Image (tube, rainbow, N blue to C red):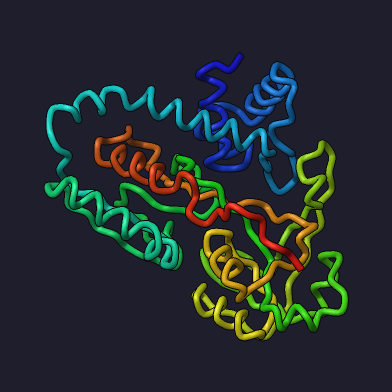
Amino acid sequence: MIELDDMRLFRALGASRSLAAAARLLNLTPPAVSVRLQRMEERLGLRLAVREARGVTLTDEGLKLLEESIELLERIESIASRVAEQSGSVSGHLRVVAPFGFGRTHIAPLLREMHLTHPKLEVSLILAESPLSAASGADIVLSIGAAKSSSWVGHFLAPNERFLCASPAYAKRIDRLDHPADLSHYECLTLRENDEDVTRLRFMPAGDSHKPGAKGITVRLSGALSSNDGTVISDWATAGLGIIERSEWDAARLIASGKLVRVLPAWRLEPAPIMALLPSRHGVTNRQRLFLDAAKRALDPPPWRQPAGVNPV
Protein backbone atom coordinates (compact mmCIF):
# COMPACT_ATOMS: atom_id res chain seq x y z
CA MET A 1 0.00 0.00 0.00
CA ILE A 2 1.23 3.49 -0.91
CA GLU A 3 0.78 6.21 1.70
CA LEU A 4 0.89 10.00 1.32
CA ASP A 5 4.33 10.16 2.96
CA ASP A 6 5.59 7.62 0.42
CA MET A 7 4.36 9.79 -2.44
CA ARG A 8 5.94 12.90 -0.88
CA LEU A 9 9.23 11.02 -0.57
CA PHE A 10 9.14 10.04 -4.22
CA ARG A 11 8.21 13.54 -5.36
CA ALA A 12 11.22 14.91 -3.48
CA LEU A 13 13.47 12.22 -4.97
CA GLY A 14 12.23 12.98 -8.47
CA ALA A 15 12.90 16.70 -8.00
CA SER A 16 16.50 16.18 -6.95
CA ARG A 17 17.63 12.66 -7.96
CA SER A 18 19.86 12.35 -4.92
CA LEU A 19 19.15 11.05 -1.43
CA ALA A 20 20.86 14.02 0.21
CA ALA A 21 18.86 16.64 -1.72
CA ALA A 22 15.60 14.74 -1.17
CA ALA A 23 16.39 14.57 2.55
CA ARG A 24 16.81 18.36 2.66
CA LEU A 25 13.43 18.88 0.99
CA LEU A 26 11.76 16.57 3.51
CA ASN A 27 13.73 17.79 6.52
CA LEU A 28 15.06 14.27 7.09
CA THR A 29 18.50 12.68 7.17
CA PRO A 30 19.81 10.86 4.07
CA PRO A 31 19.90 7.50 5.95
CA ALA A 32 16.24 7.96 6.89
CA VAL A 33 15.32 8.58 3.25
CA SER A 34 17.33 5.53 2.17
CA VAL A 35 15.57 3.31 4.72
CA ARG A 36 12.12 4.57 3.72
CA LEU A 37 12.88 3.98 0.06
CA GLN A 38 14.10 0.45 0.78
CA ARG A 39 10.96 -0.32 2.78
CA MET A 40 8.77 0.94 -0.07
CA GLU A 41 10.55 -1.37 -2.49
CA GLU A 42 10.14 -4.30 -0.12
CA ARG A 43 6.41 -3.64 0.34
CA LEU A 44 5.79 -3.31 -3.39
CA GLY A 45 8.21 -6.05 -4.44
CA LEU A 46 9.70 -3.70 -7.05
CA ARG A 47 13.04 -2.04 -7.69
CA LEU A 48 12.17 1.67 -7.85
CA ALA A 49 15.62 3.24 -8.02
CA VAL A 50 19.22 2.33 -8.78
CA ARG A 51 21.66 3.78 -6.23
CA GLU A 52 24.96 4.91 -7.67
CA ALA A 53 27.81 7.08 -6.47
CA ARG A 54 26.68 9.90 -8.76
CA GLY A 55 23.10 9.85 -7.48
CA VAL A 56 19.87 7.93 -7.89
CA THR A 57 18.39 6.80 -11.22
CA LEU A 58 14.71 5.87 -11.24
CA THR A 59 13.67 2.63 -12.91
CA ASP A 60 10.70 2.50 -15.28
CA GLU A 61 8.55 1.47 -12.31
CA GLY A 62 10.01 4.33 -10.29
CA LEU A 63 9.27 6.86 -13.03
CA LYS A 64 5.67 5.62 -13.20
CA LEU A 65 5.31 5.89 -9.43
CA LEU A 66 6.79 9.39 -9.57
CA GLU A 67 4.28 10.46 -12.22
CA GLU A 68 1.32 9.02 -10.28
CA SER A 69 2.53 10.45 -6.96
CA ILE A 70 2.94 13.95 -8.36
CA GLU A 71 -0.50 13.87 -9.96
CA LEU A 72 -2.26 12.66 -6.79
CA LEU A 73 -0.39 15.03 -4.47
CA GLU A 74 -1.07 17.98 -6.73
CA ARG A 75 -4.78 17.27 -6.71
CA ILE A 76 -4.86 16.86 -2.95
CA GLU A 77 -2.77 19.96 -2.25
CA SER A 78 -4.68 22.14 -4.71
CA ILE A 79 -8.20 21.42 -3.46
CA ALA A 80 -8.48 24.82 -1.78
CA SER A 81 -7.13 26.62 -4.86
CA ARG A 82 -9.50 24.82 -7.22
CA VAL A 83 -12.49 25.57 -5.02
CA ALA A 84 -11.50 29.23 -4.91
CA GLU A 85 -10.94 29.29 -8.67
CA GLN A 86 -14.59 28.38 -9.31
CA SER A 87 -15.61 31.78 -7.96
CA GLY A 88 -14.17 33.66 -10.97
CA SER A 89 -11.52 33.85 -13.68
CA VAL A 90 -7.82 33.67 -12.92
CA SER A 91 -5.97 36.98 -12.80
CA GLY A 92 -2.61 38.35 -11.68
CA HIS A 93 0.87 37.84 -13.14
CA LEU A 94 2.44 34.52 -14.11
CA ARG A 95 6.19 34.51 -14.88
CA VAL A 96 7.42 31.43 -16.78
CA VAL A 97 11.05 30.66 -17.69
CA ALA A 98 11.80 27.99 -20.31
CA PRO A 99 14.66 26.75 -22.53
CA PHE A 100 14.84 28.46 -25.94
CA GLY A 101 13.85 25.57 -28.22
CA PHE A 102 11.26 23.86 -26.04
CA GLY A 103 9.86 27.22 -24.97
CA ARG A 104 9.30 28.40 -28.53
CA THR A 105 7.84 25.11 -29.74
CA HIS A 106 5.60 24.03 -26.86
CA ILE A 107 5.32 26.68 -24.14
CA ALA A 108 4.64 29.82 -26.21
CA PRO A 109 1.54 28.30 -27.91
CA LEU A 110 0.33 27.00 -24.55
CA LEU A 111 0.58 30.44 -22.91
CA ARG A 112 -1.14 32.05 -25.90
CA GLU A 113 -4.17 29.79 -25.37
CA MET A 114 -4.13 30.45 -21.62
CA HIS A 115 -4.24 34.19 -22.25
CA LEU A 116 -7.16 33.87 -24.68
CA THR A 117 -9.12 31.84 -22.11
CA HIS A 118 -8.13 34.04 -19.15
CA PRO A 119 -7.63 37.58 -20.54
CA LYS A 120 -7.15 39.02 -17.04
CA LEU A 121 -4.05 36.86 -16.54
CA GLU A 122 -0.78 38.65 -17.32
CA VAL A 123 1.91 36.29 -18.57
CA SER A 124 5.65 36.80 -19.04
CA LEU A 125 7.62 34.14 -20.92
CA ILE A 126 11.39 34.36 -20.53
CA LEU A 127 13.44 32.11 -22.81
CA ALA A 128 16.93 31.34 -21.54
CA GLU A 129 19.89 29.14 -22.36
CA SER A 130 20.02 28.12 -18.69
CA PRO A 131 16.49 28.53 -17.23
CA LEU A 132 17.49 28.10 -13.59
CA SER A 133 20.06 30.86 -13.95
CA ALA A 134 17.24 33.20 -15.02
CA ALA A 135 14.74 31.89 -12.45
CA SER A 136 14.83 34.75 -9.95
CA GLY A 137 11.22 35.69 -9.22
CA ALA A 138 9.82 33.02 -11.54
CA ASP A 139 6.56 31.25 -10.77
CA ILE A 140 7.42 28.27 -12.99
CA VAL A 141 10.65 27.09 -14.59
CA LEU A 142 10.55 24.50 -17.36
CA SER A 143 13.37 21.97 -17.09
CA ILE A 144 14.50 19.22 -19.45
CA GLY A 145 15.46 16.70 -16.79
CA ALA A 146 15.17 16.70 -13.00
CA ALA A 147 16.17 19.78 -11.00
CA LYS A 148 19.61 19.70 -9.42
CA SER A 149 18.66 22.35 -6.86
CA SER A 150 16.66 21.34 -3.79
CA SER A 151 15.06 24.79 -3.65
CA TRP A 152 12.65 23.80 -6.42
CA VAL A 153 9.89 21.17 -6.44
CA GLY A 154 9.53 19.25 -9.70
CA HIS A 155 6.16 18.49 -11.29
CA PHE A 156 6.33 15.82 -14.00
CA LEU A 157 4.81 16.92 -17.32
CA ALA A 158 5.92 14.40 -19.94
CA PRO A 159 8.46 11.64 -20.66
CA ASN A 160 11.50 12.47 -22.76
CA GLU A 161 14.31 10.10 -23.75
CA ARG A 162 17.73 11.13 -25.04
CA PHE A 163 19.06 9.76 -28.33
CA LEU A 164 22.33 9.64 -30.21
CA CYS A 165 21.70 10.60 -33.84
CA ALA A 166 23.47 11.28 -37.10
CA SER A 167 22.49 12.07 -40.67
CA PRO A 168 21.89 9.04 -42.93
CA ALA A 169 24.95 10.04 -44.96
CA TYR A 170 27.20 10.16 -41.90
CA ALA A 171 25.74 6.88 -40.59
CA LYS A 172 26.71 5.14 -43.83
CA ARG A 173 30.34 6.13 -43.21
CA ILE A 174 30.37 4.45 -39.79
CA ASP A 175 32.39 1.24 -39.96
CA ARG A 176 31.82 0.07 -36.40
CA LEU A 177 29.71 1.52 -33.62
CA ASP A 178 28.48 -1.29 -31.36
CA HIS A 179 29.71 0.04 -28.02
CA PRO A 180 29.82 3.55 -26.48
CA ALA A 181 33.62 3.32 -26.39
CA ASP A 182 33.58 3.28 -30.21
CA LEU A 183 32.37 6.91 -30.20
CA SER A 184 35.98 8.04 -29.74
CA HIS A 185 36.59 7.20 -33.42
CA TYR A 186 33.94 9.60 -34.70
CA GLU A 187 33.21 13.33 -34.73
CA CYS A 188 30.72 14.31 -32.04
CA LEU A 189 28.85 17.63 -31.96
CA THR A 190 28.16 18.97 -28.47
CA LEU A 191 25.54 21.31 -27.11
CA ARG A 192 26.89 23.37 -24.22
CA GLU A 193 24.01 24.59 -22.03
CA ASN A 194 22.92 24.69 -18.39
CA ASP A 195 26.58 24.69 -17.29
CA GLU A 196 26.68 20.92 -17.76
CA ASP A 197 29.59 18.71 -18.78
CA VAL A 198 27.97 17.75 -22.08
CA THR A 199 31.02 15.85 -23.36
CA ARG A 200 30.52 13.18 -20.68
CA LEU A 201 27.65 10.72 -21.24
CA ARG A 202 26.61 7.69 -19.23
CA PHE A 203 25.16 4.67 -21.06
CA MET A 204 23.32 1.55 -19.92
CA PRO A 205 22.49 -1.50 -22.07
CA ALA A 206 18.87 -0.92 -23.11
CA GLY A 207 17.67 -4.33 -21.96
CA ASP A 208 19.50 -4.19 -18.61
CA SER A 209 19.20 -0.49 -17.73
CA HIS A 210 16.98 -1.05 -14.70
CA LYS A 211 18.13 -4.45 -13.49
CA PRO A 212 19.54 -4.50 -9.93
CA GLY A 213 23.30 -4.14 -10.05
CA ALA A 214 23.36 -3.28 -13.75
CA LYS A 215 26.61 -1.54 -14.66
CA GLY A 216 26.75 1.48 -16.91
CA ILE A 217 29.63 2.95 -18.84
CA THR A 218 30.68 6.59 -19.05
CA VAL A 219 32.39 7.95 -22.15
CA ARG A 220 33.69 11.37 -23.08
CA LEU A 221 32.79 12.69 -26.50
CA SER A 222 35.34 14.39 -28.71
CA GLY A 223 34.82 16.77 -31.58
CA ALA A 224 35.81 20.12 -33.01
CA LEU A 225 32.32 21.66 -33.14
CA SER A 226 30.15 22.79 -30.23
CA SER A 227 27.47 25.44 -29.66
CA ASN A 228 25.06 26.68 -27.00
CA ASP A 229 22.19 26.62 -29.53
CA GLY A 230 20.37 23.34 -30.15
CA THR A 231 19.17 24.37 -33.62
CA VAL A 232 22.75 24.99 -34.72
CA ILE A 233 23.85 21.58 -33.47
CA SER A 234 20.92 19.84 -35.16
CA ASP A 235 21.63 21.69 -38.44
CA TRP A 236 25.27 20.61 -38.30
CA ALA A 237 24.21 17.01 -37.71
CA THR A 238 21.70 16.97 -40.59
CA ALA A 239 24.48 18.40 -42.79
CA GLY A 240 26.52 15.27 -42.01
CA LEU A 241 29.14 16.82 -39.74
CA GLY A 242 28.93 14.31 -36.88
CA ILE A 243 26.97 12.57 -34.13
CA ILE A 244 24.76 14.46 -31.66
CA GLU A 245 22.98 13.68 -28.40
CA ARG A 246 19.52 15.27 -28.47
CA SER A 247 16.32 15.10 -26.48
CA GLU A 248 13.55 12.99 -27.94
CA TRP A 249 11.19 15.99 -28.07
CA ASP A 250 13.48 17.63 -30.63
CA ALA A 251 15.08 14.66 -32.35
CA ALA A 252 11.83 12.76 -33.05
CA ARG A 253 10.67 15.14 -35.80
CA LEU A 254 14.07 15.00 -37.52
CA ILE A 255 14.11 11.20 -37.32
CA ALA A 256 10.54 10.98 -38.64
CA SER A 257 11.44 13.22 -41.59
CA GLY A 258 14.51 11.10 -42.41
CA LYS A 259 16.99 13.90 -41.72
CA LEU A 260 18.50 11.98 -38.80
CA VAL A 261 18.75 8.34 -37.78
CA ARG A 262 19.54 6.84 -34.39
CA VAL A 263 22.92 5.34 -33.64
CA LEU A 264 23.78 2.97 -30.78
CA PRO A 265 20.10 2.04 -30.27
CA ALA A 266 21.08 -0.93 -28.09
CA TRP A 267 22.35 1.48 -25.42
CA ARG A 268 20.22 3.85 -23.38
CA LEU A 269 21.03 7.28 -22.00
CA GLU A 270 19.45 8.51 -18.78
CA PRO A 271 16.01 10.00 -19.58
CA ALA A 272 15.40 13.75 -19.23
CA PRO A 273 11.68 14.11 -18.39
CA ILE A 274 9.95 17.42 -19.00
CA MET A 275 9.49 19.01 -15.58
CA ALA A 276 7.78 22.16 -14.31
CA LEU A 277 9.74 23.49 -11.34
CA LEU A 278 7.98 25.52 -8.65
CA PRO A 279 9.62 27.34 -5.72
CA SER A 280 9.45 24.97 -2.76
CA ARG A 281 8.82 27.81 -0.34
CA HIS A 282 5.35 28.50 -1.77
CA GLY A 283 2.10 26.58 -2.07
CA VAL A 284 0.63 26.10 -5.54
CA THR A 285 -1.26 29.24 -6.61
CA ASN A 286 -4.30 29.33 -8.91
CA ARG A 287 -2.07 30.66 -11.70
CA GLN A 288 0.50 27.89 -11.29
CA ARG A 289 -2.24 25.27 -11.08
CA LEU A 290 -3.80 26.61 -14.28
CA PHE A 291 -0.45 26.30 -16.10
CA LEU A 292 0.28 22.79 -14.77
CA ASP A 293 -3.14 21.48 -15.79
CA ALA A 294 -2.91 23.10 -19.24
CA ALA A 295 0.64 21.79 -19.79
CA LYS A 296 -0.30 18.24 -18.86
CA ARG A 297 -3.25 18.30 -21.26
CA ALA A 298 -1.10 19.71 -24.06
CA LEU A 299 1.69 17.13 -23.53
CA ASP A 300 -0.51 14.04 -23.04
CA PRO A 301 0.21 12.18 -25.20
CA PRO A 302 3.63 13.72 -25.85
CA PRO A 303 3.58 15.36 -29.30
CA TRP A 304 7.00 13.92 -30.08
CA ARG A 305 6.00 10.28 -29.54
CA GLN A 306 5.42 8.55 -32.88
CA PRO A 307 2.78 5.80 -33.22
CA ALA A 308 5.26 3.55 -35.00
CA GLY A 309 8.82 2.79 -33.98
CA VAL A 310 11.71 4.54 -35.68
CA ASN A 311 14.05 2.36 -37.68
CA PRO A 312 17.47 2.61 -36.03
CA VAL A 313 20.80 2.23 -37.75
In this view, 37 is above or below 295? above
Q: Position of residue 109 (x, y in %)?
A: 31, 58
Residue at 42% from the left image edge and 60% from the top image edge: 131
Q: Position of residue 31 (x, y in %)?
A: 67, 27
Q: Is residue 307 left or right of residue 72?
A: right
Name which quarter of the figure residue 217 lies in: bottom right
Q: Which of these two is toward me, 101 or 297?
A: 297
In this view, 225 is above or below 109? below
Q: Is residue 141 left or right of residue 212?
A: left
Farthest-out residue, top: 1
Residue at 56% from the left image edge and 39% from the top image edge: 14
In this view, 309 is above or below 90? below
Residue at 70% from the left image edge and 35% from the top image edge: 49
Q: Is residue 13 left or right of residue 111?
A: right
Placement of the N terminus among the 4 image quadrants: top right
Q: Is residue 230 left or right of residue 82?
A: right
